[in-house]
Amino acid sequence: MSWFIRKEKGINTPTEEKREAPDGLWYQCPNCKKIMHTREHKVNAYTCVHCNYHEKIGSDAYFSILFDDGIFTELDANMTSGDPLKFVDTKPYPERVKATINKTHLKDAVRSAYGKVNELDVTIACMDFNFIGGSMGSVVGEKIARAIDHSLKTRTPFVMISRSGGARMMEAGYSLMQMAKTSAKLALLSKEKIPYVSLLTDPTTGGVTASFAMLGDFNIAEPGALIGFAGPRVIRETIGKNLPEGFQSAEFVLDHGFLDFIVDRKDLKDKLTSLFKMLQ
């Protein structure tokens, strides 16, 4: 049986002959740790095929999922933040914005666009958490307000996809004013009886939750999304008590009456279409 005995230990393939797997070919779910092909993950609307974990995604992915054939027209694509307060923390605010633009290739924390969703004309605004934590500054409020104006002008349903850490501290009171501005615009949408659906994704917190994110004709959320005003740690330290299991999860919020339903991302496009047809 000498032929069965390995005479040399280890693998002696020269480095130049080794074949590396291309970067980005495989995706590991952060929840169940299982591996799947990146293409399979994308086709599955960026949800795990094993445990249905909903990966955190941005406007590019949502627009490709929702708009027919990924075709849309973006609104106010080049709007960027000013520096009305001359704010400086570890670096001046304009430098932080410029660095974030270069890193993310986004102009700010929200993008808005219009196009067809299952042949229905729809206007969508979607937040990007990668841009300074999806924080709401004056540009975010203005772009959402203008997207609502577009819905009013064209009488198309409006969808807001929220993912945010709250108001942007570098703009202080200016960012808080966006809560009132967007809420006032949504009141006009309601007055005209134009449907508004708010989708809350992980996480949706702070002033975003306290304004436009919770003002939809339908407030819906993705499974497992963190939804709240202050974070769990802040609440726990304030009240001095342990919080219930699953506190501030989408499922907890649904059970307590603040959501209409939870929707799997793979079903989102069809669910939105059904809602709009029902509200016509």
Image: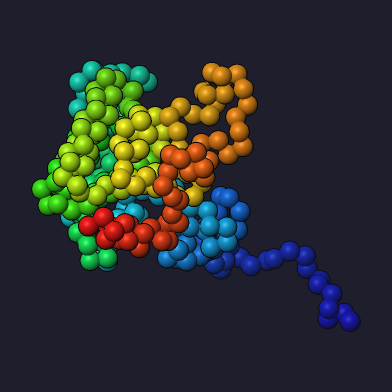
Rendered location of residue 258, percent (x, y): 43, 39
Q: Outermost residue, left direction?
A: 153
Q: Can residue 174 be seen?
A: yes
**Visual colour scheme:** rainbow
Q: For the point 39% across and 29% down, which residue is it?
A: 206
Q: For the point 61% across and 37% down, which residue is it?
A: 245
Rendered location of residue 117, percent (x, y): 26, 61
State which quarter of the image contains the C terminus: bottom left
In the displayed structure, would residue 122 be above or below residue 134?
Answer: below
Q: For the point 34% across and 54% down, which residue is it?
A: 62
Rendered location of residue 127, percent (x, y): 32, 42
In the displayed structure, would residue 93 be above or below residue 63?
Answer: above
Nearer to the camera, 81 or 244? 244
Residue 73, image quadrant = bottom left
Q: For the point 45% across and 56% down, which residue is it?
A: 264
Nearer to the camera, 163 or 212? 212
Q: Can residue 269 be seen?
A: no
State which quarter of the image contains the N terminus: bottom right
Rendered location of residue 200, percent (x, y): 39, 44
